[in-house]
Image (cartoon, rainbow, N blue to C red):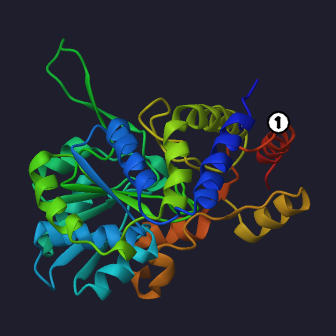
Amino acid sequence: MIQTYSTTIRRKEMDAVLTCMVDEKIGPGELNAKLITQIKEFIKCDGAVALRSPAIALKYALKSMGLESGSKVMVSALAPAWQYQSLVSMGFEPLVLDVDEVNGLVNEQIISEGIKQGGKVLLLHETEGILPNLEEIVKLGVPIIEDISQSAGAVFNLTGEEGSAQQQKMAGTFGVYSILGLEERDVITAGGGAVLISPGRREWIVLKKYVDEAPLTDLLPDINAALAWVQVKEFGRNEKTRKELFAMYQQACFIGRHKMYARENENGSTACSFPLVLSSSYKDVKQYAAKKDIEINLAYENSIIALKEELSETCIHAKSLYLRCVHIPLYPRLTHAESSKIIKVLSSLP
């Protein structure tokens, strides 16, 4: 039996937010600091700062890295459009990379080609909670900013010597800095905001210098931090529910005609969403689901490839996935009746 979203968790979220409102302490303060402590325990990092948006987090990361204006920053064509827009506004040149059609991610071969084209930094969006081969990507030697907004909680199995115990590293600990978005569709949400994470002490010392000088308008208000804090604290329970749903959705899709991404189904991926790559018309599938009172949407409707039509010729796989990949509702709050309806529809999609 699937665990539905606990009323206890919902009550904790409401209590945390209401306490802020009653105390009239909704700006950056005690709960912002409490969230940072929770994130440091969750990700196992040296330092972190909670900010008002992922775009602000990216600004501080690039400033701390000392990247020269005009430098090329590599991004996935399926990454959120804000990444492209923010890089341009900050004076950098986005170098948009195509993806592997098997999992929707940039891989080491694609990144290597990007480096040959002048890419100086990789902004690595771990799309749909799936991790690429981080070990091989790190070997390329290019500085990485991990975007773990969809992959928080995932782990990567490192290749050890034969017979040695297998070691694991969490998503968010491979880059120079990592961005954990707290936006509406991210795996941990505060309704808005982001946490900029520094896995290493040396990099944190540099970042902290800028953080200490940050205006209050850059820092995450306590009213948002309150919600994020509860979600991080209850991440394990929410993720267990999402993975139970994900497994049942998978079973329903095995008998269907549509495809799923290749991914590690245990700790290797986060079940932040259920993407399905259609083999038939999106319009037909959407209409069929709507008749059953189930709303599905294009998974990458707010991506870079959706924003920049001129990338269609160079990012062929990304363009195809943009047109064919949809999100099936996957939320811890789904009731048993709602999830059962979705599973039935998945097994009969046209």
Q: Is residue 275 visible?
A: no
Q: Quadrant of the C terminus?
A: bottom right
- Residue 196 image-quadrant placement: bottom left
**On the rendered structure, is 297 left or right of 223?**
right
The local secondary structure at tag 1 comes to: helix
In the figure, 213 relative to 50: above or below?
A: below
- Residue 125 image-quadrant placement: bottom left
Q: Which residue is drawn at the image coordinates 42% and 69% (left, top)? A: 53
> Which is nearer the eye, 43 or 347?
43
- Residue 300 image-quadrant placement: bottom right
Q: Residue furthest front?
A: 23
Q: Position of residue 54 (x, y in %)?
A: 39, 67
In the figure, 254 relative to 321: above or below?
A: above
The residue pinned by badge 1 equals 336
Number of marks in the image? 1
Q: Position of residue 208 (x, y in %)?
A: 18, 59
> Which is nearer the eye, 318 or 138?
138
Q: Amino acid at mark 1?
A: His
In the figure, 244 relative to 92: above or below?
A: above
Q: Is residue 279 visible?
A: yes
Q: Position of residue 333 (x, y in %)?
A: 73, 44
Q: Quadrant of the N terminus?
A: top right
Q: Position of residue 137 (x, y in %)?
A: 20, 50
Q: Residue furthest top?
A: 163
In the figure, 208 relative to 55: above or below?
A: above
Q: Which residue is drawn at the image coordinates 13% and 46% (left, top)? A: 201
